[in-house]
């Protein structure tokens, strides 16, 4: 299993704290700390220059007690089995907290999509899906977009699966284009959920939401949508960084102009609406809310002491190390954990899966209203659990998730 210091090891540390408080049955503990299935595949692809490259792909189904595995597919040079296993575990807890009938899964391919043509990406996607075809399906495992994958990649996933099973199967994947069974509101769902929990966290602390200052790390789908919706909701987004650089404006950034700039330049670095800043500057800013919306392990023991925000919203998966979280908690920073904060995406993925299976689609207003209800209920569940056990929100979120998955595991019993 994962080595000490790995991403999966960090997940286990978080799990163990909550499991001890729950006095979890040792047998259930063992089940819930082992992935059900880890798949490693080789994906040969003929590149545009005629040469054949072999890419390594992973699909992990961590737990399917509550329903089909659910989780994204990411394309990145640093994808590893350890990372994908941790992300699949987090998806298990995220679905349980959101109270939706899915287990946790995750997939990834070791590649650099920025150096691949559209044809090469399509060929890789189709080969990867063909290699894991027996493991996925509307009632088995339902993939979705993640880092460096999008609605077009999901369209290729759906088409490849449909060609293999001999009929169009829209419910095999979520995050698809709306024209082929995608849900309205899905693209904005994670960012909208981030906005909702930020508002609820401010309310919980008695902090004025309107006018609150916000700093965001990351300007991909989640970061940019979060920034846009938070600005529209009345907060003052003063700083944003991405992979190349960052911008600060004490009066508040013009997010609409920044979105246009990012579309043209593929980065916000050099945006003329503010002063240039680094990630280090962003994390040390005196703001009300800090939102890491990039990759894992961004907030560490090295920089946690310099964070001055009152609230940290984990829009990314695993952005805070366990040591850093301990420092933040001791300093009184309210950390809203990833398995709650970014669960808007999987919640609307669930709505998309339901709509596909019914063959009846909702208006965007209805999708957003249902998401609002789900996110507020999940936040309240975690806050109430936090108060009951006198623990931080991360531990409370794990307690909620472990209780739900553990209870059903016991009810179902052991298949022998």
Image (tube, helix red, strand yellow):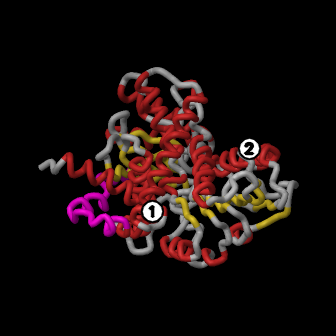
Examine the rendering and report whether any part of residue 57 can be seen.
Answer: no
For image coordinates 60% across by 74% down, the residue present is: 304
Residue 260: percent from left, percent from top: 79, 43
Q: Nearer the viewer, mark 1 or mark 2?
A: 1
24 is within the stretch colored magenta: yes
**Crowding near pointer 1: few (<14 within 10 Å), some, many (20+)?**
few
**Crowding near pointer 2: few (<14 within 10 Å), some, many (20+)?**
few
- Magenta range: 18-42
Q: Which mark is residue 45?
A: none
Residue 308: percent from left, percent from top: 68, 71
For image coordinates 63% across by 75% down, the residue present is: 303
Examine the rendering and report whether any part of residue 312 can be seen.
Answer: yes
| First of labels 1, 2 by sequence position | 2
Q: Is residue 28 shown above or below 178?
A: below
Q: Which mark is residue 232?
A: 2
Q: Is residue 360 shown above or below 94?
A: above
Contact between marks 1 and 2 (CB within 8 A): the answer is no
Residue 383: percent from left, percent from top: 48, 57
Q: State the image quarter where residue 201 is shown.
A: bottom right
13 is within the stretch colored magenta: no
Residue 277: percent from left, percent from top: 78, 66
Q: Secondary structure at mark 1?
A: helix
Q: Which mark is residue 387?
A: 1
Question: Which sits in the foreground, 274 or 106?
Answer: 274
For image coordinates 32% across by 55% down, the residue present is: 403
Q: Is residue 177 shown above or below 312?
A: above
**Marks 1 and 2, Cα distance to the nearest angstrom?**
31 Å
Q: The N terminus is located in which quarter?
A: bottom left
For image coordinates 48% across by 51% down, the residue present is: 380
Q: Is residue 399 left or right of residue 372?
A: left
């Amino acid at each position: 299993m994962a080595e000490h210091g790995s991403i999966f090891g960090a997940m286990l540390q978080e799990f163990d704290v909550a499991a001890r408080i729950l006095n979890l049955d040792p047998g259930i503990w063992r089940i819930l700390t082992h992935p059900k299935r880890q798949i490693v595949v080789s994906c040969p692809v003929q590149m545009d220059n005629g040469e054949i490259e072999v890419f390594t792909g992973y699909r992990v189904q961590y737990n399917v007690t509550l329903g089909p595995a659910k989780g994204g597919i990411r394309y990145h040079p640093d994808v590893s089995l350890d990372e994908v296993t941790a992300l699949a575990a987090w998806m298990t807890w995220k679905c349980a907290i959101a109270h939706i009938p899915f287990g946790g899964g995750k997939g990834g391919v070791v590649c650099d999509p920025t150096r691949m043509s559209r044809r090469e990406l399509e060929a890789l996607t189709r080969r990867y899906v063909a290699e894991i075809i027996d493991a996925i399906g509307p009632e088995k495992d339902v993939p979705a977009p993640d880092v460096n994958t999008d609605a077009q990649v999901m369209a290729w996933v759906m088409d490849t699966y449909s060609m293999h099973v001999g009929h169009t199967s829209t419910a095999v994947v979520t995050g698809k284009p709306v024209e082929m069974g995608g849900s309205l509101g899905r693209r904005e769902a994670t960012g909208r959920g981030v906005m909702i929990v930020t508002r609820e966290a401010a309310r919980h602390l008695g902090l004025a939401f309107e006018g609150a200052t916000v700093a965001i790390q990351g300007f991909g789908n989640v970061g940019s949508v979060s920034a846009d919706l938070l600005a529209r909701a009345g907060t003052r987004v003063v700083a944003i960084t991405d992979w190349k650089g960052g911008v600060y404006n004490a009066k508040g950034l013009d997010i609409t102009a920044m979105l246009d700039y990012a579309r043209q330049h593929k980065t916000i670095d050099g945006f003329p609406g503010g002063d240039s800043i680094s990630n280090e500057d962003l994390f040390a800013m005196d703001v009300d809310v800090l939102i890491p919306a990039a990759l894992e392990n961004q907030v560490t023991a090295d920089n946690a002491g310099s964070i001055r925000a009152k609230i940290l919203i984990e829009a990314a998966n695993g952005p805070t190390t366990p040591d850093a979280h301990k420092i933040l908690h001791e300093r009184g920073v309210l950390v809203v954990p990833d398995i709650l904060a970014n669960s808007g995406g999987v919640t609307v993925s669930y709505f998309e899966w339901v709509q596909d299976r019914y063959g009846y689609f909702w208006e965007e207003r209805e999708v957003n209203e249902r998401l609002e209800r789900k996110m507020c209920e999940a936040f309240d569940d975690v806050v109430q659990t936090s108060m009951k056990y006198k623990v931080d929100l991360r531990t409370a979120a794990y307690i909620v998730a472990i209780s739900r998955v553990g209870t059903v595991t016991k009810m179902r019993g052991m298949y022998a």
